[in-house]
Image (tube, rainbow, N blue to C red):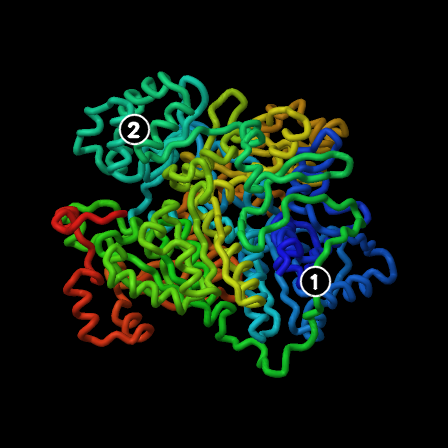
C-alpha cells in the first residue's frame, strides 16, 4: 500500500457541531488520510475565535484541531440546508457530532432515520456530561470539567487557591477516546459488522487522569491534600526544581532511584537512612529533605544534572520552554512538531503522535478557510450501504474487538491502560509477568513481610489497570519461558510493551524476530522518548513526560516556577495514544495482511496540550504569557473560595450574556447594566475588583450550593473536587460509571467504566484483574496444549508460578539480565 495515500483513505468522516473533542477525533482520522468534511455555519466554527491568536488573528487552537480537513459551509436558514447535510452524512462512513457541546447553527437532522437507511454508518456523539444524569445540561468549560473531575484541587500551593492549567486538556483526552470508539468500530466493520453508535462523555474522559488517585483513596482513605506546587502524593520527590541554569524535573519512584539520586548529590546520610527508603515515608519529611537537596541542585545546570542522571538511571529531565521545543531537531525529524499553514501565515504545531512506521501519518498540513475543499490523493471506496449478506448486524453482546488477541508485556500505568482499553472493547489480552519481576504496580517493596503476606495482590492501581485480562507468569530469561511466549506471539494480533527501549531486544524478542514469527503482528513500543531518540536510555515516569513536554512552562503565575498539572500526567495520555495507534495499524493489517512496528514516544504524546503556544511562538517569536488561574479570553475566570475549609469552585463567564447573568446573580446589577463592561476586554481592566465581587458571593455558600445556583442561571461552574469525592459523585452514580467487582484479596471494589458507551449503560466489566499467574494452566493448556505434567515441571523449575519472590529469594537465584 502506498503510505503517502494514508491507511484510512478509504474512509469519509463528517464533523458537525463545535467541540474540541470531536474536532480532535476527526483530526486523528485526517492524520491517516481520511477525507474529513467539517460542516460550519457561514460565520465559521466558533472555535476559530479561540485564544491564543496568531499575529494574523488566526486561532492556534483551531489550527491544531483542524489541519488537513475540508470545510463545507451550510447555512441553516437556506431551504435546502437539511437536504444538503443529510446527503453529505449518508455518503460518509463516520459521523462525529459535537452539537451537544455547541450546535454551531447546524441544521436539525434525524440521525436515527439516517442510520436506519445507512446501517454501516459509525456514529459518535459527544457531550460534556452525557445525555442523562444530574450534570446533563450543565454549562461547562474545560476548566470547570477538570475541577469536577478531581484534577485541580490537588495542584498548587498549600495555602491559597489551587493553581490550575489553562484550557485545551479535556478536548485532547476526549478526542482520543472518541477516536478509539470510532476506530474500533471500523475494525469491527471490516469483519462484516454494521456500524455502531457511541456516546462520549467529556467529563468521564477526564477521569482517565484522576482514576488512580480516586481508587487509591478508596483503599487508603482521605489521605490526599494539596501539598505544594510541583508536589504530589504518593511520590517524593516528583517535581520541578531550580538549578544553576534552567529547571529540572525529578522523579524517584523506586528505592534504587532514590539512592542513586542521593549519591549524585552527595547526600549519603539521606541515602543510607532506612526510614527514607520508600516514597510514602519521604513524604512525611518533605521540607527537611528539600532543604538539603535544593541548594545542591543550584550548583550545576539542568543539562549537567540531566547527563549525570542518565548515567545513574534516574528519571530526571530538563524542563523546556516553548522556544526550546521549537529548536529541538529530533522532534522535527520525528514529526512531533510539524508545519501548518493558517491563511497567509506559516507556523508549527504538534503533529500526530501515533508514529506508525510502515503507514506514517501526514506531516503537517493546511487549515481550511470556511468553505474550502482540500484535495488529497486517496483511494476511497463507498462503504456506507447495507451490510454484506453474510453479516447479521451487531450482536448485542459482541464487542468491537472480540476475536483480537493481545500479548501484553507492559507494566505500571501507560501500557496497561492501553491494553485495558483493548480488553474493555473485547480483545483477549494475555498479560505476561514473572514471579521474579512482576508488574511493578503490584508494589516495589520486596521485603519478606510484604511478599509473604501477598500485599502485592492488594494494590488498587494494579487492579483497575488490569481488569478484563488474563495473566500468566513466564521467566523470559530461560529458554523454556522464551519458547512458550514465542508460541503465544505466533497466534496473536497485537504486542504492547512499555519497557525501556532494549528490554525485549535483550530477551530475543525484537521486532526483527517478532515479524518472522507472525507477519500480521502489530507491535507497539511505548518508550519514553522513542526507539531512535538520543535520549532513548533515559528513564521516565508519567511525571517525567509532563516535565519534559513544555506544558509546565505555560502554567502558573508570571514570576513563578513552571507548574505541573498532575503527578503522572503522561501515563494516561501515553496509554490512550498507544491504543489509538494500535487500532490504526490493526485496520491496515486487516486490509493488507501486514503488521508493523509502532514507535510511540510517550513524551511526544504530551505535546498537543502545549500546541497553541507552539504555534503562536513559531510565528511571532513571543514567549507565552502565564496568567495563573485567569484566561486569555474569558473574564472572570478563576477558582473562588467557598464556605468551609479549602472549598473552591471554578467559575467563568464565556460570553457577554453569561457575564450579565453572573453579575445579576451575585447582586451586582450595576455591573450588569454597565455598558462599559459588556466585553471581556473591557472587564479585563477591573478583573481584580470583579474577582473580589464573585468571591464575596461564593464565600457565603457551600461549594455545591454555589454550583447549583450558578448552573440554574446557566453559568459555567464546577466544584473543585478531591479524587475521593468521585466515589460518591451523584452524576457518576446515576450513570452507573462505577462498577462493583469482586476479586481475591481485594473483595468487592469499584472500577471505573470507559467514557464511551453504546447504550444507556457502560460496557460491563467481565473479570477482575488477574492474581499473579492466575491463568497459567488455562493459557498453557488451552492455547498451547501443554499437559498437566509439563505445566507442573515448569512450576517446579520456577519458569511459571503464582507467588512473587522476595529480595532474599531473588538473590539466591541466578541474576537476570534485565
From the viewer's side, name the closer residue of 213 and 69.
69
The mark that comes first in sequence, 2 or 1, is: 2
Vertical placement of 508 versus 312: above or below? Answer: below
Q: Picture coordinates of residue 331 (x, y %)?
A: 54, 37
Q: Is residue 717 left or right of residue 768?
A: right
Secondary element type, mark 2: helix
Query: For residue 99, what is the image quadrant?
Result: bottom right
Q: Picture coordinates of residue 729 (x, y %)?
A: 45, 52
Vertical placement of 654 versus 218: above or below? Answer: above
Image label count: 2
Q: Is the N terminus in the top left, top right, bottom left or bottom right quadrant?
A: bottom right
Say whether marks 2 and 1 touch (CB < 8 Å): no
From the viewer's side, name the closer residue of 752 and 381.
381
- Identified at 80% across, 52% down, the residue is 73
Q: Which residue is mark 2?
A: 286
From the viewer's side, name the closer residue of 712 and 335.
335
Q: Residue furthest right?
A: 79
CA gap, disc 2 to disc 1? 59 Å
From the viewer's perspective, is the residue at label 2 or at label 1 nearer? 1
- Identified at 65% across, 23% down, the residue is 686
Q: Is residue 104 left or right of residue 600?
A: right
Q: Picture coordinates of residue 542 (x, y %)?
A: 41, 42
Q: Is residue 219 left or right of residue 11?
A: left
- Whether residue 698 is visible: no
Residue density around tag 1, few if under 14, some if 14–19, many if 20 or more, within 10 Å: some
Secondary element type, mark 1: loop
Q: Which residue is mark 1?
A: 379
Vertical placement of 110 versus 299: above or below? Answer: below
- Identified at 29% across, 60% down, the residue is 482
Q: Picture coordinates of residue 326 (x, y %)?
A: 58, 31
- Whether residue 12 is visible: yes
Amino acid at each position: 500500500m502506498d503510505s503517502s495515500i494514508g491507511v484510512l483513505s478509504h474512509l469519509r468522516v463528517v464533523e458537525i457541531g463545535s467541540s474540541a473533542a470531536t474536532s480532535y477525533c476527526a483530526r486523528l482520522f485526517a492524520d491517516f488520510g481520511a477525507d474529513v468534511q467539517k460542516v460550519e455555519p457561514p460565520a465559521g466554527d466558533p472555535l476559530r475565535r479561540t485564544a491564543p491568536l496568531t499575529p494574523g488573528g488566526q486561532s492556534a487552537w483551531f489550527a491544531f484541531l483542524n489541519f488537513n480537513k475540508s470545510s463545507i459551509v451550510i447555512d441553516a436558514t437556506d431551504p435546502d440546508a437539511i437536504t444538503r447535510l443529510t446527503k453529505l452524512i449518508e455518503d460518509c462512513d463516520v459521523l462525529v457530532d459535537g452539537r451537544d457541546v455547541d450546535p454551531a447553527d447546524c441544521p436539525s437532522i434525524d440521525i436515527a432515520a439516517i442510520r436506519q437507511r445507512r446501517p454501516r454508518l459509525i456514529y459518535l456523539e459527544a457531550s460534556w456530561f452525557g445525555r442523562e444524569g444530574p450534570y446533563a445540561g450543565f454549562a461547562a468549560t474545560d476548566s470547570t470539567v477538570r475541577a469536577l473531575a478531581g484534577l485541580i484541587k490537588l495542584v498548587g500551593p498549600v495555602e491559597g487557591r489551587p493553581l490550575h492549567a489553562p484550557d485545551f486538556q479535556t478536548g485532547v483526552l476526549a478526542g482520543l477516546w472518541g477516536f478509539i470508539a470510532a476506530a474500533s468500530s471500523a475494525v469491527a466493520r471490516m469483519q462484516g459488522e454494521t456500524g455502531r453508535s457511541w456516546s462520549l462523555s467529556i467529563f468521564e474522559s477526564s477521569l482517565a487522569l484522576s482514576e488512580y488517585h480516586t481508587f487509591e483513596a478508596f483503599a487508603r482513605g482521605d489521605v490526599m491534600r494539596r501539598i505544594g506546587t510541583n508536589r504530589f502524593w504518593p511520590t517524593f520527590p516528583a517535581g520541578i526544581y531550580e538549578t544553576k541554569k534552567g529547571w529540572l524535573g525529578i522523579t524517584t519512584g523506586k528505592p534504587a532511584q532514590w539512592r542513586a539520586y542521593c549519591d549524585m548529590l552527595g547526600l549519603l546520610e539521606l541515602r543510607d537512612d532506612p526510614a527514607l527508603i520508600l516514597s510514602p515515608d519521604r513524604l512525611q519529611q518533605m521540607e527537611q529533605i528539600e532543604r538539603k537537596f535544593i541548594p545542591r541542585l543550584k550548583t550545576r545546570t539542568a543539562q549537567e544534572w540531566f547527563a549525570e542522571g542518565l548515567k545513574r538511571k534516574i528519571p530526571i529531565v530538563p524542563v523546556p520552554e516553548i522556544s526550546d521545543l521549537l529548536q529541538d531537531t529530533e522532534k522535527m525529524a520525528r514529526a512531533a512538531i510539524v508545519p501548518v499553514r493558517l491563511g497567509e501565515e506559516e507556523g508549527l504545531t504538534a503533529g500526530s503522535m501515533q508514529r506508525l512506521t510502515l503507514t506514517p501519518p501526514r506531516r503537517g498540513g493546511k487549515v481550511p478557510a470556511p468553505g474550502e475543499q482540500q484535495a488529497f490523493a486517496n483511494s476511497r471506496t463507498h462503504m456506507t450501504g447495507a451490510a454484506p449478506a453474510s453479516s447479521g448486524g451487531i450482536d448485542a453482546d459482541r464487542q468491537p474487538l472480540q476475536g483480537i488477541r493481545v500479548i501484553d508485556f507492559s507494566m505500571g500505568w501507560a501500557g496497561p491502560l492501553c491494553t485495558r482499553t483493548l480488553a474493555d472493547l473485547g480483545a483477549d489480552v494475555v498479560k505476561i509477568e514473572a514471579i521474579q519481576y512482576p508488574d511493578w504496580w503490584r508494589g516495589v517493596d520486596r521485603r519478606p513481610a510484604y511478599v509473604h503476606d501477598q500485599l502485592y495482590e492488594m494494590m488498587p492501581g494494579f487492579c483497575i489497570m488490569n481488569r478484563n485480562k488474563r495473566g500468566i507468569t513466564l521467566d523470559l530469561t530461560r529458554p523454556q519461558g522464551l519458547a512458550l511466549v514465542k508460541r503465544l506471539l505466533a497466534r496473536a494480533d497485537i504486542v504492547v510493551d512499555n519497557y525501556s527501549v532494549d528490554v525485549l531486544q535483550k530477551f530475543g524478542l525484537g521486532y526483527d524476530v517478532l515479524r518472522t514469527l507472525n507477519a500480521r503482528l502489530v507491535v507497539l513500543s511505548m518508550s519514553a522518548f522513542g526507539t531512535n531518540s538520543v535520549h532513548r536510555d533515559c528513564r521516565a515516569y508519567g511525571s517525567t513526560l509532563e516535565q519534559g513536554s513544555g506544558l509546565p512552562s505555560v502554567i502558573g503565575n508570571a514570576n513563578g516556577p513552571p507548574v505541573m498539572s498532575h503527578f503522572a500526567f503522561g501515563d494516561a495520555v501515553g496509554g490512550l495514544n498507544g491504543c489509538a495507534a494500535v487500532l490504526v495499524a490493526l485496520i491496515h493489517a486487516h486490509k493488507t495482511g501486514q503488521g508493523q512496528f509502532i514507535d510511540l514516544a510517550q513524551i511526544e504524546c504530551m505535546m498537543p496540550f502545549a500546541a497553541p503556544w507552539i504555534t503562536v511562538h513559531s510565528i511571532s517569536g513571543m514567549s507565552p504569557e502565564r496568567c495563573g488561574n485567569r484566561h486569555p479570553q474569558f473574564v472572570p475566570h478563576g477558582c473562588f473560595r467557598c464556605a468551609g475549609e479549602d472549598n473552591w469552585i471554578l467559575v467563568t463567564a464565556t460570553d457577554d450574556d453569561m457575564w450579565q447573568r453572573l453579575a445579576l446573580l451575585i447582586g451586582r446589577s450595576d455591573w450588569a447594566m454597565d455598558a462599559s463592561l459588556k466585553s471581556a476586554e473591557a472587564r479585563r481592566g477591573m478583573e481584580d475588583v470583579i474577582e473580589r465581587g464573585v468571591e464575596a458571593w461564593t464565600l457565603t455558600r457551600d461549594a455545591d450550593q454555589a454550583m447549583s445556583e450558578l448552573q440554574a442561571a446557566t453559568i459555567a461552574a464546577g466544584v473543585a473536587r478531591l479524587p475521593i469525592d468521585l466515589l460518591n459523585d451523584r452524576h457518576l452514580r446515576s450513570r452507573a460509571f462505577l462498577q462493583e467487582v469482586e476479586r481475591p484479596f481485594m473483595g468487592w471494589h469499584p472500577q471505573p467504566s470507559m467514557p464511551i458507551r453504546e447504550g444507556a449503560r457502560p460496557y460491563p466489566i467481565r473479570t477482575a484483574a488477574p492474581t499473579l499467574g492466575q491463568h497459567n494452566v488455562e493459557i498453557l493448556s488451552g492455547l498451547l496444549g501443554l499437559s498437566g505434567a509439563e505445566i507442573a515441571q515448569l512450576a517446579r523449575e520456577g519458569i511459571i508460578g503464582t507467588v512473587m519472590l522476595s529480595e532474599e529469594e531473588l538473590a539466591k537465584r541466578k541474576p537476570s539480565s534485565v
